[in-house]
Amino acid sequence: MPETLSRSSLSFLVLSVLLIGFSPATTMAAESIEINMKLLGADGQNRDIGSIRAETTPYGTVFTPNLNSLEPGLHGFHIHANPNCAAAVKDGKSVPGLAAGGHYDPLNSGRHEGPYGGGHLGDLPPLYVDAGGAASQPVLAPRVSLEDLSGHALMIHASGDNYSDQPAKLGGGGARKACGVVR
């Protein structure tokens, strides 16, 4: 030990290193949840296609998909109001995933403005599916927390989403293709 470093200075240095090394910020694991996703079948038979991990970050919630068996391209991706992926009847026809209800809108904004706008919280960034039908690219939803997800459903739509009600209602995402309930 160098002679210029006193015993009290050495103790302070060791204590500082220990406190920095074991601070809650560095030892605390990020909060996350795993949502199992199912491909919605017209016959009500839903097939597992993987999962999406939702994780808290300082910038919002990151959704990291590990999915397969989807159509390539961009897909509308939303939080829906109800924790239910079952089919429901609309206009006399069974519609897969309809029991999930509409997009999650806790403040009743009634506006479809995308993940960065001031509308409902249900709008998430689009989900990208590669040519092989797999989705693995994370997306960030800056206004969403894990608490917002609890008791709702995640929905993947057949088409992309322009975050407007023009020219098609609810961004033109189309049919509900895959769903997972967040407990």
Image (cartoon, rainbow, N blue to C red):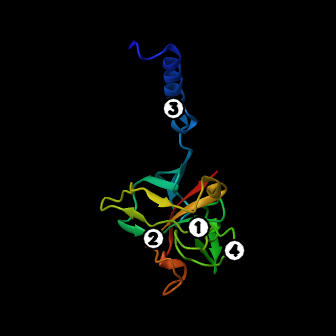
> Which numbered circle lies on residue 108?
4
* 2 vs 3, front mark: 3
Under tag 4, what secondary structure? loop
**Percent x, y for residue 82?**
66, 63
Q: State the separation of the CA atoms marked 1 and 3.
A: 38 Å
**Marks 3 and 4: CB-CB under 8 Å?**
no
Circles 4 and 2: CB atoms closer than 8 Å = no
Residue for point 54% across, 39% down: 25
Which amino acid type is marked by label 3? Ile
The residue sitting at 56% across, 67% down in the picture is: 96
Number of the label disc, if any, that sits on residue 122: 1
Name the element at disc 2.
Answer: loop
Q: Is residue 31 above or below residue 122?
A: above
Mark 1–mark 2 Cα distance, whole angstroms, equals 16 Å
Nearest-to-viewer mark from 1 and 2: 1
User: Dividing the image into 4 quarters, which one contains the N terminus?
Assistant: top left
- Of the two numbered discs 1 and 3 in the rendering, the one whose residue sits closer to the viewer: 3
Q: Please report contact status of discs 1 and 2: CB closer than 8 Å, yes or no.
A: no
Regarding mark 3 in the picture, which secondary structure is present there? helix
Residue type at mark 4: give it: Asn
